[in-house]
Amino acid sequence: MTLFRSLTGLLALATVAGLILLWPGKVESKIGQGIAAKSEAAEIERVEEFACEGAGTQRCRRAVARLQSGPQTGKRAQLDLGAGGLNPDLAVGDVVRVVRNEVPPGARLPPDQLYNLTDFERRTPLLLLALLFGGLVVLFGRFRGALSLVGLGLSLAIIGLFVVPAILEGEKPLLVAGVGSFAVMLTTVALAHGLGPKSLAAILGTAISLLLTIGLAVLFTELTHLTGLSSEEAAFLQVNEAGVDVAGLLLAGMVIGALGVLDDVTVSQASTVLALRAANPSLRRRELFGRALDVGRDHVTATVNTLVLAYVGASLPLLVIFSSTELGFLETATLEIVAKEIVATLVGSIGLIAAVPLTTALAAQLSMSLQRSELAGVGLGHVH
């Protein structure tokens, strides 16, 4: 138990040191109006169709919207929607986001070119969905559910306040993602499960598995010659944020993506081992390991399937596009835009599989040093 506490303490100290050394200062934005301009809300009052100039039989569209925010609140804006199919269909009552074009001094723009449609207003439905999610988590998880929401908030805060700004500042994305992942893991596991035997085994199991995942990600990114430049977002960053290592950014995404399933599996396995040991203190370490591993196999099978389907679901539009071409499966799979998802999925899955025996062995070893009174209740805090 003392050894486990010492190792966890060293990991925590190293993580804090990494956070201090890599913590970003104020990051200056290099991205201009094209992507990051401030938009305002506007409600569609009227949609008109008219014959397009020089477009044959095509019909063009124009919308009139009343601004709901910003210094021009209450005024109307004309939006040129172009030919049908080039912009989303709008209906009276829709709330959208619009951006006012910058006009040079002395210049004048036609009324329908003063504002551009950027997107739909989605804040209200997204807020309702988030409230529904949070309410259900608290309803079913009660106090632990509320703690998990706090942990989720801390995770997002670490990513938003540390990981993203540090990468933008020019730090190595993989190093930043590694430190950020350890910080997320330590805070969420400790918050949700305390720092008892179960958490100690889970933290060390997750840490080792995460290091393995990082090693595999680096190795197979090199072997498959992934550059990180296959997406429009990466190309945009390369142009506008020259200090960002896009290949490292690809690796960072793999690491953070794998963390989400790793800590769930490791906590579950540690919980299983300690529950079995508490129910039957006479079990020897080898027998305890074998029984817990049987449970872990079922968990891994379901979780790997979940991980693969999550990546497939995110890439479905891409798969549909390539399925409509004459490229075969193998040639499609070797394209970087597809290969990077395959590497991320398989690397994350291997790390997940390795986490089960690693955490089971650690928890079994730890349980041998615990008294019956220390085992009481320690395995009952993680339920699927």
Image (cartoon, helix red, strand yellow):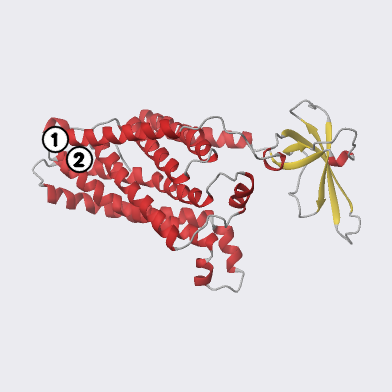
- Residue at left offset 53%, top offset 50%: 246
Q: Amino acid at mark 1?
A: Leu
Q: Amino acid at mark 2?
A: Leu
Where residue 263 appears, as percent x and y from the top left, is 34, 42
Where residue 298 appears, as percent x and y from the top left, is 30, 54
Question: Which of the pair 298/310 is nearer the observer?
Answer: 310
Question: Which of the pair 240/350 is nearer the observer?
Answer: 240
Crowdedness near tag 2: few (<14), some (14–19) or many (≥20) residues, C-alpha within 10 Å: many
Task: Decide if residue 357 is on the left or right side of residue 227.
Answer: left
**Relative vertical location of residue 320 with respect to residue 235 in this rendering, above or below:** below
Element at label 1:
loop
Labelled disc at residue 232: none
Q: Measure the alpha-carbon separation of dots 2 and 1.
A: 10 Å
Where residue 208 appears, as percent x and y from the top left, is 29, 46
Labelled disc at residue 274: 2
Crowdedness near tag 1: few (<14), some (14–19) or many (≥20) residues, C-alpha within 10 Å: some
Labelled disc at residue 370: 1
Q: Quadrant of the C terminus?
A: top left
Question: Which of the pair 209/11 is nearer the observer?
Answer: 11
**Relative vertical location of residue 218 with respect to residue 187 in this rendering, above or below:** below
Where residue 257 appears, as percent x and y from the top left, is 44, 47
Question: Which of the pair 111/254 is nearer the observer?
Answer: 254
Visible residue check, residue 153 = yes
- Residue at left offset 27%, top offset 32%: 9
Task: Decide if residue 72 is on the left or right side of residue 273.
Answer: right
Task: Decide if residue 251 is on the left or right side of residue 44.
Answer: left
Element at label 2:
helix
Asked if labels 1 and 2 touch by Cβ distance under 8 angstroms, the answer is: yes
